[in-house]
Amino acid sequence: MSERTISVGLLGMGTVGRGVYRILKDNQAGIKQKIGATLAVKKILVRDITKDRGVELEEGLLTSDAGEVIDNPGIDIVVEVLGGIDPALKYSLRALEQGKSLVTANKDMIAAHGKELFATARIANRDLLFEASVAGGIPIIRPLKVCLAGNRIRQVVGIINGTTNYMLTRMSKEGLDFQQALSEAQSLGYAEADPSADVEGHDAARKLAILASIAFNTRVSLDQVFVEGITGVAARDIAHASNLNYIVKLLGIAREGKEGVEARVHPALLPKNHPLTSVNDVYNAIFISGDAVGDVMFYGRGAGEMPTASAVVGDVMDAARNILNNVSGMISCTCFEEKQVKPMGLTKTKYYIRLSVADRPGVLAGIAFIFGNNDVSLASVIQHTAGQFAELVLVTHEVFEKNLQKALQSIRELSSVNEICSVIRVEELDEGAAP
Ligand code: NAP
Ligand code: HSE
């Protein structure tokens, strides 16, 4: 067995950084057996070197000078777990230029600057690995890039935000409203004080941009992902959906069809018998259909100190193996095609629509007329009396998004319509990708 040591520098020692340090220390012997070298943390960049990190650290390990990590000739692998774009991007590019392999958990940075980072890694002949950037502890980047590489991927559908999945689970199981579920998620430390990135779908959109780019070998940028969060989902919708045999989930959907690639994040009604509906609380899952493999599903913890660190350490070990074997770029950029991203208006789905309307003759006929005029066909209509108004719960057949939006615009102008309370897409997600 080689006595070689591979030196690691951490940029950040927050939640994920601490987990990485713990795993590298606690599992050191096993890691050495597996890669044939010792992984030793040499320097850790933080803002405040006096802060208690909750782990025992050697004197002098912490630094507030980034150069001691990224320009340090004794460091082989840099792990970026700072978060955000600035200074994470600047430091990551410099680390690659200085000949370090780079491991990152930073979805914001990869989704926005993946192209530049990959180009820099290629020129420097170093690895750029980012398994933890999507769905935390769940192995998904490597399975897509390696194990499923022989497939034409038809669709990737994921529950890729734990906070919103926790909230929707609580709304579904306990009948909590949005605010109650959010307060609970915040008190448990799942949701941030500013929860907008989670509840408005932006966190999931960054992860979906990364997944779609890998699945379809084309760069799908963040601004090409349609995003709608869960702020418009009410406990009432979840209850109605349940009566119709559906569960509401925030989904990231990437699909390839004749008109291009679809990439969208939005809440959706899923049939109760779909495997993704059994993914509850903070768990994440990603359901993939490939032409050869059929359907596969990956399930696990999408965040948290140790699950996320588990993915980071897997990448560090891979980078170390490559250094020991004098190779790099084994899992390099696979965006080798230019593909159209389909405009949202051309997407076809079913819709669940909840309306508050005047309870008098002719109202339903007027609404049905507008839908019909816009080529929107109704699959079911249920009416409930709700005080002075009637509540209409409609489900359409598959229609074009642009037709549905046009119809809703006209319906909104009807004096008999008090409010369009909710519009949620219905995804049947047929599992018809059998090999
Ligand atoms: P965090 O707890 O906020 O930790 C950030 C660390 O970076 C802290 O140690 C902080 O130092 C240091 N830092 C930040 N800016 C710095 C700067 N300008 N100079 C020096 N040090 C700086 O973040 P985290 O939760 O570990 O997340 C890290 C990354 O992992 C993010 O990209 C995140 O999206 C990703 N990720 C996190 C999770 C999760 O469950 N937390 C899951 C998946 C992916 P101080 O401690 O001194 O302030
Ligand atoms: N905030 C994210 C979530 C975890 O709730 O899943 C980090 O990506």
Image: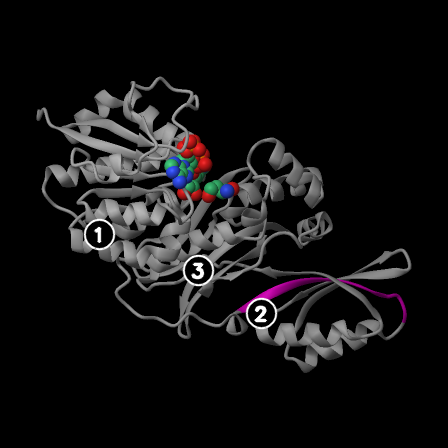
* Magenta stretch, residue numbers: 348-360
Which amino acid type is marked by label 3? Leu
Q: Tag 3: Cα neighbours inside 10 Å, few (<14), some, or many (≥20)?
A: some
In the rendered image, the vertical position of residue 409 relative to residue 148, given as above or below: below
Callout 1 touching callout 3 (CB < 8 Å)? no
Quarter of the image for residue 370 reads bottom right
- Precedes in sequence: disc 1 or disc 2: 1
Mark whose residue sits in front, 3 or 2: 3
Give the CA distance from mark 3 to mark 2. Answer: 26 Å
Magenta-drawn stretch contains 350: yes
Which amino acid type is marked by label 1? Ala
- Precedes in sequence: disc 1 or disc 3: 1
288 or 102, which lies in front?
102
Residue named by callout 2 = 398
Note whether residue 435 is visible: no
In the rendered image, the vertical position of residue 131 relative to residue 359, given as above or below: above
Quarter of the figure that contains the N terminus: top left
Tell me: 17 left or right of 246: left
Residue named by callout 1 = 121
Residue named by callout 3 = 222
87 or 388, which lies in front?
87
Tell me: 341 left or right of 11: right
Give the CA distance from mark 1 to mark 2. Answer: 44 Å
Callout 1 touching callout 2 (CB < 8 Å)? no
Tell me: 371 left or right of 224: right
Tell me where residue 107 appears, x and y as whole percent: 40, 48
Residue at image location 35% in from the left, 17% down from the top: 56
Residue at image location 70% in from the left, 74% down from the top: 409
- Precedes in sequence: disc 3 or disc 2: 3
